[in-house]
Image (cartoon, grey):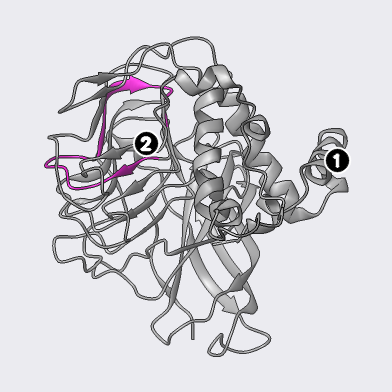
Amino acid sequence: MKDFSYITNSSPAFIEGLYQDFVKDPSSVDPEFRKFFEGFDFAVGAGKATNGHETIEVKGDGIRLDGIDWQKELNAYRMILGYRNKGHLIAKTNPIRERKDRGANLDLAFFHFTDEDLDKNFFAGNLIGLGPNGISELGNENGIEMRSNNCEVSGNRIAGNLLDGIWINGGKFNRIQGNSFGMNVQGNPTQSYGWAVRVDGTNNIVGAPNNVGYAPGLGNAISFMDTGGVLVNGINNSVRANLSDFNGYANDGSAPDIKLTASGNFQQPFPVIDSLSLPNGLPTSGPVAATISGHLKSGPSALYRIDVYYSPTCSPAGRGHADYYLDSKALTTDAAGNVAFSIPVTLPFSPSTSVLSLAATDAYADSSEIGSCFAID
């Protein structure tokens, strides 16, 4: 997973200047900032959607979210992350003298809030299925059931529920991003039955959409779900950039991280890795550069986005997990539906059991399952 802490720790004026350069010419900024701004633009664009926002129903406590200002919700989530990461910089721990200003950027105005917003309720950052301490289990049936369209669920911790964490029950154009499933606030497993996200609908997004590149900040963290990660029973559902492992009743990774039913995403095929080039040797003492060579057999003359995932181990079914999201590349198949490709990546420090795997998403947002393991050796 790429570390974007250098962005949150930078001067807002500096970031704003880079962003204006990106708007004029994306190729003029550093590739890592370009990837960040691509994800940012999608999040802000989605937040400004005006149609829909009809209902999200949280089973168990009757909360219903109608007419949400999603830009405010995103800003609230940014503030939560800001205090988690830098709140200690403004803590008053010395009764004798004031703390030196470390530029934490945690005031209301930095997140585009005013004093009037202090009396409003925001729904990002909820504990769903957990008590107020984030540890005790107070599970609902389904953590969240979504029956409507154009809704967003972001920045929540969803665990300890009796059925699925989120059930998209017929809804479409919904976005599930930046949530944590199956873990309490200490990062420990919480008995969570069902799927993290069950998609019985069309045109939904779980993680990153199909029309952006490498955007890890949009993904969800999914672990320790008894039945599995994301179940897709519908078409045009983008499932990308999520980190997922240790799903299964015994927390052993035996449950699938992404599962397509017979009608799910037209059973989009996943790419296959043919070889791995390691010019600097194995990553046994630290990260190393590598190049993946592979192929995809799918629709003719069609655009696809290939995502690369890394895991320390392979699943019992021979499929990879998504402990790290390494990179993404867009490519187009030929008239026979074939395309060969190579993708340069940086492999993290790896045990001898480590594997790589790939997934594909087409231009209509039909994502595949995570593909077969390829051993790093």
Task: Please give the label number shown on residue 141.
Answer: none
Mark 1 or mark 2: whose residue is earlier in sequence: 1
Observer-nearest of 358 and 43? 43
Query: Quarter of the image holding residue 340?
Result: bottom right
Residue designated by label 2 = 265
Q: Residues within 10 Å of mark 2 (few under 14, many from 20)?
A: many
User: Compared to 129, does 243 lie above or below?
Assistant: below
Residue at screen point 59% across, 47% down:
215
Residue at screen point 39% across, 28% down:
123
Residue at screen point 55% across, 39% down:
78
Judged left or right of residue 221, residue 189 is left
Q: Which residues are magenta?
A: 156-175
Task: Please give the label number shown on residue 17.
Answer: 1
* Magenta run includes residue 64: no
User: Compared to 17, does 49 lie above or below?
Assistant: above
Observer-nearest of 198 and 361? 198
* Magenta run includes residue 158: yes
**Quadrant location of the N terminus in the rendered image:** bottom right
Question: What x and y, as percent, mark residue 225?
Answer: 22, 53
What whole-number distance in Å separates the C-alpha atoms at marks 1 and 2?
A: 40 Å
Query: Quarter of the image holding residue 15?
Result: top right
Q: Amino acid at mark 2?
A: Asn
Judged left or right of residue 137, residue 307 is right
Q: Residues within 10 Å of mark 1 (few under 14, many from 20)?
A: few
Q: Amino acid at mark 1?
A: Gly
Q: Residue furthest front?
A: 96
